[in-house]
Image (cartoon, coloured by chain):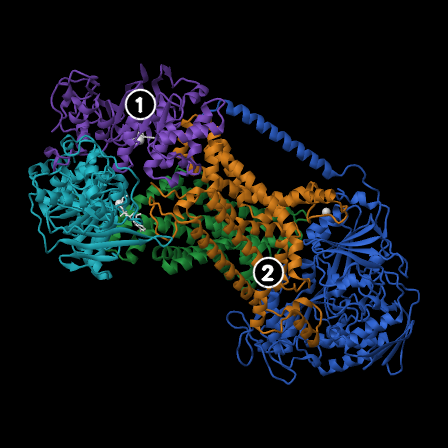
Amino acid sequence: MSSEARSSNEEPSSGSAPSSAAPVRGEKSLTARDLRVEFGLPGGRVARAVDGVDLDVAPGEIVALAGESGCGKTTLARTLLGLERSTGGTVAFGGEPLRYSTKALKAYRRQVQLVLQDPSGALNPRHTVYDAVAEGLRIHGITDDEPGRVADALSRAGLRPPEQFFLAYPHELSGGQRQRVVIAGALVLRPSILIADEPVASLDASVRGEILALLLRLKEEQGLGALVITHDLGLAWSIADRIAIMYLGRIVEQGPVEQVLTAPRHPYTRALVSVLPGAPALKEAVPEPIVLAGELPDASRIPGGCRFRPRCQEVAAGRAAEVLHRCESEDLEILGPESAPHLVACHLDRARREDARDGGARMAV
Amino acid sequence: VAAPSAAAQENDTDSLLIATDQEVDTFNPFKRRFVITYNTSLMTYETLVRMGADYEPEPGLATEWEESEDGLTWTFTIREGVEWSDGEPLTAQDVAYTYGLLIENQAIRDWNIDFAGNLVSAEAPDDTTFVLTLAQPSPWDVLTREVFVVPEHVWSTYPDPSADDANQLPLVGSGPFQVTEYETGEFITLEANEGYWDGAPGFDEVVFDYYEESDAAVAALEAGEVDIVSGLNPAQIGALEGQDGITVNNAQGRRYVSLTINYNSVTKDGTEFGDGHPALKDPIVRQAMHMAIDKQELVDTVLDGNGQPATSIIPEIFEQYHWDGGDAVLDFDIEAANALLDEAGYVRGDDGIRTMPGTGEPLSFRFYQHADSTDYATIAQFVSEWWAELGLEITPEAIEQGTLNDLAYLGEFDIAFSGWGVGPNPTEQLGMHTCAVLPTLTDGTERSSENNYCNAEFDALHEQQKVESDPEARAELVREQQRLMYEDTPVIYLYYQNVLEAYNSDKITGMTMQPSEGGMITGQQGYAWAYVTAQPADAEDEGGTPMWVWIAVAAAVVVVAAGAIVFVLQRRKTADERE
Amino acid sequence: MTLLEFKDLHVTYTGSRGRIPAVRGVDLKVESGRTLGIAGESGCGKSTLAMAVLRLLPKSAEVTGEILLNGEDLLTMGWGRLRAVRWTGASIVFQGAMHSLNAVHRIGRQVAEPILLHEEGISPNEAAERAEALLERVGLPSSRARSYPHELSGGQRQRVMIAMALACDPDLIIADEATTALDVMVQAQVLQLISGLVTERGVGLVMISHDLSVLSEVCDEVAVMYAGSVVEQGPAHEVFANARHPYSAALGAAFPVIGDPASRKRPGGLAGDPPDPVRLPDGCAFRPRCAVAVERCGEEVPALLAVPGAAGEGPARVSACFVAQEGEPVVV
Amino acid sequence: MTDGSSTADGASTEAPSAGRSRPGGRVSSGFGRYLFKHVGGAAVSLLLVLFSSFFIFRLIAGDPIDQLTRERPVSPEERAAMRAELGLDQPMWQQFWDYITGTLTMDLGESFQYRRPIFDLIVERLPATLILSGTGMVLAVVLGFWIGTRAGWKQGTRFDKGHVATGLLLYSAPTFWLGMIIILVFARYLGLFPVNGMRSPSTPPDFWSQAADIGYHLVLPVLTYTAVVYAGYLMIMRSSLLDEIGSDYLTTARAKGLRDDEVRRKHAVPNALLPTVTLVFLALGGVVNGSIVTETVFSWPGLGSLFVQSIFYPDRPVLQALFVLFSSSTILAVLGAEILYWFIDPRIRRSG
Amino acid sequence: MTTTTPVSPRSLRWARRRQSFTRSWNAYRSQRTGMIGLFLLAAIVILALAAPILVDESQLSVTQATGGRMEPPSAGFPLGTDEVGRSILALTLWGARLSLLIGLTATVVAILVGTAIGVTAGHIGGWYGWIALRFSDWFMVLPSLVVAIALLAVLGRSMSTTILVIAMVSWSGTTRLVRAQTLTVQARPYLERAKALGAGHWHQMTKHILPNVLPLVLASATLLVPSAILMESSLAWLGLGDPNVVSWGSILNRASSNGAVSAHAWWYLLPPGLAILLVVLAFMMCGRALEAVFNPRLRGEQS
Ligand SMILES: Nc1ncnc2c1ncn2[C@@H]1O[C@H](COP(=O)(O)OP(=O)(O)OP(=O)(O)O)[C@@H](O)[C@H]1O
Ligand SMILES: Nc1ncnc2c1ncn2[C@@H]1O[C@H](COP(=O)(O)OP(=O)(O)OP(=O)(O)O)[C@@H](O)[C@H]1O
Ligand SMILES: [Mg+2]
Ligand SMILES: [Mg+2]
Ligand code: NI
């Protein structure tokens, strides 16, 4: 058993060059446009959990979605899968807008699969590994060669030899193995996109790497696309091609991981990066940890104008005085993924860029 | 063990404590429904003619009475010097007022229509004379009907004498006791009328004490908490017999238990209704069934011998009217019964069940019993087993009272339990079996005829006995009526139930029973002989501190000690407790 | 002065699965005013160690060895003395603030409770005032004293726990996974607060976490535990940046350094399952998952010895790895 | 983080609310909403009780007049007069309307068997029931909670095992049977206590004598009642405490230096008690059950024995009224408990 | 690494079921009280089933009764006789059949109804869920004996109505339990995963919710049986049972209406009462043990 585990550890190193497998946009990609999800709360208030999001995930690329707790990551993921109805905007797969009929959803869910945070919870304790993996096949009425397909999925997820795991119950497996079973359950339907909501958050530190390596390998070898949701920027650094930073229901910065994480432009991203422990490479970009004041933002009370303004360190430090009126009144446009590789939704950033373009090389970042 | 505080109280007042399980519905004597209500009326008020200890009419408020030649006018001489319990004198005006209510007050008239319907006028020419005019001669109704004379000076103040205004306590009456206090579910207190014209009762008060369970009443009797208990079952009698200071009174009762057979569900105009089994129309079948019941066995097992096998509707207690069957009585003989049925062509099928001669319909009967009586369940089981030997298929079914009544009056049954308490005037019971009371509708709402029995000969006898003034001649007629019914067998009378009572003979002496020989204490009719004549015996007082005080003290000590110990241990333990 | 010292501490639970050696011979020292980090994955015995300090372990735990707090052995102390030492000598910030606070008492009362308990003659009012002051110390408005725990966010609750830990001015604070469940930003707030307190008040701090990167930020020194034993110990930064035990290395790799191309798209991880404490392998407990294991590892239990190649300054680098002790690299 | 399903037995009490509220999400739902939800629910239940009570008892077969005149021949005129007096000649809708308006104005009609306003009957008999089941319930709750606390705290000890076994044994005994056995032993063989009833008629009317007499009569019924019921509370309290016992906040309390019994008294027991509040009130249905049986065994002149007696009569108006009374009192008690719960347990305010 | 022979999923599943059953059984077996309860229960059930063999039915006949009236225990009648002279032992043995039958059938009915409503109410929710919840809450809060008495008065008395009535007053507890458990399961990520895999309601209910609810239902059913038996005996004792059948409650009803207490006829009162007590106790012991096995929250309890 240790030999197969080790092999999984070695493989990523062979293809470690950044974005070796080029994403295949188009046919099989998942796109969200101006997606909005609102929840009615008691007392008539409305939580705008997802408040205008444009996002693309194509096969062959890993997109990380990061942000604070409660910013709407899970809701976005659920909506992308059709588990939550959007109140505005569209989700499309391969260009086809998602329809919510039972049949259409079922067909859609063969293509787009979900991996949840807590593998122990995601497996029914009364189902064996075999049953758990075969469940998708049974739901979709795929009956031919069930054991073969299950075995194949398990071995692709790194559980080898698969037959040894067939009869195991979830509680007999370690956390990492459980998460592999969940992934195998998703892979058995041969989806093109995997949405993973905090896939390793509940796993032990040393075990995490294995699962991430698996995702990376699936991308490299099978051209699987993945949206990995996390609040851990380090994780994004470990596997993602692109990253989107979400704040209060909206993506505030988006772009290739190297750019966003090493040269963050949105004040929120900068703050996030700055509090990461022990990151010498960043010390130049953000010298002092910026600990944001205030509590978690509340999706039912999204401030007008720039939604980050109340906690913005730039505003607090008075560095944004020139654009403050815009921060207070002007809502920022939704970041469309197609327009540029690195996008930022910040008035200050925009002003500075314009300044830079107009008035020469006075780049702050 | 003495009652907690009975001892303290006994010195002042002699109380006669009687266990009861019935609630009082009303103290209005015109609306009596329950035995207990009847008893309180009987003690509080009086009638013109009262029922003697042996059920013979004797002077009550009237010292004399006279029937006119045509039997329509009755003249009563009212006793002088009788006072109401509030001190007002009782006069013939009060009597006239009372009878007047029966005639004029629509509600009271309706309540008592069987008697009041026959009244024409009630007058009091002077203070001691009362004249009653009837529409039809009816000597026995006039003499035995309990019309409780009420005080006009009180009752005329009631806006509606038919309502429960009459419940205002204390009651004002002329009887030996007056109801003074009533706590539902607890007790009814009647205080002795010291100025009673027939002499003050022996006890200062009579208290009906409430015991829902007879076992509890028995225990209370043993404990001296109650003096008279009734409605006992054989086991309880067994337990009480031979106990010191307790006398068991095992008296003949007025109640019969019977099986009603659905053989004739027709209305007055001959319309048939219901779904009774056709075979039951055949008297042979009914007689065979009658013969297959061992009544003595039922008396022995169900009543533990405390009763008599029944022959007719009038129980043995009313000796003069009771028909004992003589030679005509059918003895328990299953073989003979089987022979009867064989002869009549009811052959047994392969399953042993007999079938009807023509149609071949099996003799399969529904047998309904009141669900709330375990005695009936036992009887049903006995009878079913016997009848099974006759080749009858019996399905006993326990049914709610109300449902059973509905079904019975709708004629939708085959055999059903029934039972009545019979009064001293046989007209009432026999009247339920005349053609006159057959239903006119088939919806079962009239409920006047007990079993749709209709026999012209019986009816003729009935009319005769109603107006026959000579007691012996009348009894002869009544016995003949019973004979007819026995032969026709519309109803199988199973047994007469004894009244099982017990009393504290250390405390009570001198009670007059009804009948005076071997009679009953509770459930007396026409006059509360027992309670009036009961005298306190000289029972020695069990002085000293009552037991319960000691128990309370002991309990308190134990509790306090236990608390102290727990407290001390608690302190000690927490001082250095391992966590 | 040595504030806290574990001497050959062993803790063994007796459970339905048999005897579970949760802590196996730990020797550690914490000086006043310094911070010790304890790292290790789930189940390696970190919490057991922490709970042992105040003898809060369940009855099923058998503790041997010595735990000296200010020179006094906590394990042999009488109950009365122990209760007095609790919270005044050492206090604990538990991992799950939600569950460690009583949900039905107002937080002011909970913070004041130890004050009332340990300080003779203090009036409830004074204690309440002190509690409010403490809440302000940890950045909560004093009006929050009237709140119930559920009215606060996770970070705020954790700060309440910290305020409570400070209530009786203990010499030692043990923070058991004080930031694990928290969001990045809140975690940063809490860490800032804790390190501020340590420098300000000079208390000794034992900080427990599975996140080596966090410990490297806050602590002076870090001990890495595996299967109930310390496998590596040394200055915080060095243990994180330059591990001398394969397990520490794997643990460190789980928290990549952003901007470091070496860790870009190379998620570090450790194969295999965490050890089952009931059935530990012979020799080095880490051997089944070790990439650099040599033959000797299966036979002998490596002792915690100084390793060569470490920088001269600061506390000695010790590691329980034969390979590292020979100066070989432990990272693959 | 869990949502702190805060009850002894998650299943038997508040289920997670139907509205989707997230565990950690601080969805602040106000008292108003909570109150509305519960009061509304209770109101619906009360209406159901009111309606069903009318129709259920209307379905009892039989002519009430037969019952009133049991074993006595009745002429059709008398029958009609009685029907009119009882209002049975009214059309059904009229009876229903009278019933609804009557019940709402506390005019519960007249009993068939007592021919008195039912309201008076109830007022008369209520104290007896309150004395018996009140005493019994208080004793059972106190005893059950006290033992349950100790048993749970020292779980697995001889004390715990012994009390759980005793409790279960008594809990398994049919109430009426236990009552009969107790009568047999204490009243019949030993003769220590009266067999039944609430008072002796011969007791002097002054307050103390009456109180002593009632107390004396109360012993056996309360003993029976408590014996059967206390085990339920014992189990509730014990499992509620066991739920708390592993909690971290208790470790915190110990770490602060509290003594073991202080930890129990100040932290564990109050916390464990709170979720039992609704359970205790929910058990009120059981109180009614218990009092019906106990009152019948001991002929205690309360509402329970009135109910049983009325069934056999059958006294429809009384049944109707008692059904409404019993049911609505349990519904209102549970509602009260739920409202109370809001105030005493801050945890509930989190989830609404 | 072994190469395994091809396996059929079906046999696989059965193998695992057997295993998990064995595991539950082992967990159950470790509970002393549960085992005592089980033995007790088995003994009672065997006695009840064997009643016709042990005691001829003719012993229940009143016309063939040989004993005297309420005789105390003797060699011929080890537990004495009733008022007709039948053996109390025979009655008690035969009574077991009916009491158990009523208890079990009523429970089965209640459980079926309760589970169906509970699962659907929890899973489907919405208006239906609200109404189902209110309705079951309503039944839950109503005093069960009062409702049972009222219903019996209306429906008449027979074994089937008794069963129906007991089921009617006991289903609501199960509904609540099942609904709560359904909601818990519903909130589990594996349901989310199933949904994400494309599962419909039926699949979710049958494959995930029911299997997770059933063990608890089993445990609660085991605890419902005793309350059904107690309820039946109370009703019968109050005189609301069918007097023509022999159940423990009706024996006691006969005993008390025939003055067994007054007659000090303890042999008439004790056997049926003790029988009820034992059966109830046995079921409760089993039920608590099952609960401890299936409800992990309680598992720590029996240590
Ligand atoms: N079903 C719901 N009903 C009401 N509000 C909801 C619901 N689901 C989510 N929300 C709200 O929407 C917002 C976003 O929630 P979401 O779970 O998507 O956040 P998240 O980024 O996944 O957070 P975390 O990191 O804690 O998982 C939160 O404010 C949450 O309270
Ligand atoms: N009460 C107990 N009974 C039996 N075993 C226990 C008990 N508490 C802990 N253990 C075991 O002791 C070992 C160490 O547990 P401990 O809680 O100290 O680990 P930890 O390092 O704090 O883990 P985590 O990071 O998950 O908090 C584990 O294997 C655990 O299963
Ligand atoms: Mg989330
Ligand atoms: Mg821990
Ligand atoms: Ni008394």
Horizontal and vertical percent position of residue B40: 78, 61
Task: Tell me which corner region of the image, top left, top right, bottom left or bottom right, holds residue D347.
Answer: top left
Task: Tell me which corner region of the image, top left, top right, bottom left or bottom right, holds residue C332.
Answer: top left
Relative horizontal placement of residue C99, taking residue B176 as reference (left or right): left
Which type of secondary structure does the marked residue at label 1 adopt?
helix
Q: Which mark is residue E52?
A: none
Residue, disc 2: D321
Residue type beneath disc 1? Glu
Question: Which chain is home to disc 2?
Answer: D
**Which chain is depicted cyan?**
A
Please tell me which residue is depicted at 45% across the width and 56% down the height of the picture. Answer: E136
**Which chain is depicted orange?**
D
- Kindly tell me whether residue B502 is visible in this rendering: yes
Residue, disc 1: C200
**Which chain is depicted purple?**
C
**Pick the front one: B505 or A308:** A308
Which type of secondary structure does the marked residue at label 2 adopt?
helix
